[in-house]
Image: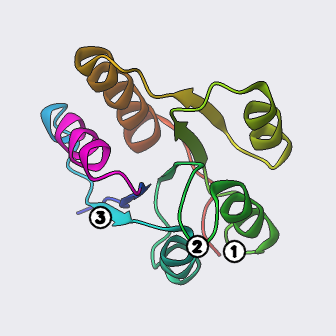
Amino acid sequence: MVSLRPIFLVEDNPDDEKLTIRALQRSNITNEVQVARDGEEALKMILSATPLPCVVLLDLKLPKIDGIDVLQQIRANERTRFLPVVILTSSSEEGDIVESYSGGANGYVQKPVDFKQFTAVVTQLGLFWALINEPVAEK
């Protein structure tokens, strides 16, 4: 039996955390969702994860270490440099988008305010990264 790789959600807003997890569950995505609520916790979880997650859904505005710094440290680590990281944030600032892609983000998604749209976006992200995307094999 194939073991599903977890989805890592890095989110400090409890409401967005609950909505994201609910949307993934409603989509019948059965990957475990592991949550970090600040950048420091995220790095500890990600850099020590076995197996690596199928995707990291990363907020930008985080306590302790911000999302851009988390992304840079993921990319700087030999083991996690190809790990898919999608920025999932409320920011639509051009500078955040450019900095995220420059830092190696695989995608940038602005969180919709509308509940149905938010659910649809998270569902599509989960389906693609958990079921469709072909990851680089771990060494």
In this image, 33 relative to 69: left or right? Answer: left
Q: Quadrant of the N terminus?
A: bottom left
Q: CA distance from mark 1 to mark 3?
A: 20 Å
Q: Report if residue 82 is visible in the image.
A: yes
Q: Which residues are magenta?
A: 12-24
Viewer-proximal residue, 5 or 99?
A: 99
**How much space separates mark 2 and mark 3, taking CA atoms?**
32 Å
Instruction: Kindly identify the residue that appears in the image at 59 percent across and 78 percent down.
Output: 47
From the image, tell me which residue sits under label 3.
3
Point out the residue furthest to the right here.
Answer: 102
Camera-side residue of 94 and 2? 94
Q: Quadrant of residue 130?
A: top left
Q: Which is nearer the eye, 38 or 125?
A: 38
Q: What type is the residue that disc 3 sits on?
A: Ser
Q: Secondary structure at mark 1?
A: loop
| Horizontal relation, residue 95 to residue 28: left or right | right
Which of the marked residues, 1 or 3, is nearer the chain's N terminus? 3
User: Which residue in the structure is indicated by mark 2?
Assistant: 64
- Residue kind at label 2, given as amino acid type: Lys
Give the image location of residue 134, x and y in percent: 55, 43
Q: Report the predominant secondary structure element of the magenta stretch.
A: helix
Q: Which residue does the numbered mark 1 point to in the structure image?
A: 79
> Which of the colour schemes (rainbow, by chain, secondary structure, one colour) is used?
rainbow
Secondary element under disc 3, as helix, strand or loop, is loop
Decide: marks 2, 1 in contact (CB < 8 A)? no
Residue 107 on the magenta segment? no
Q: Position of residue 125 (x, y in %)?
A: 43, 32
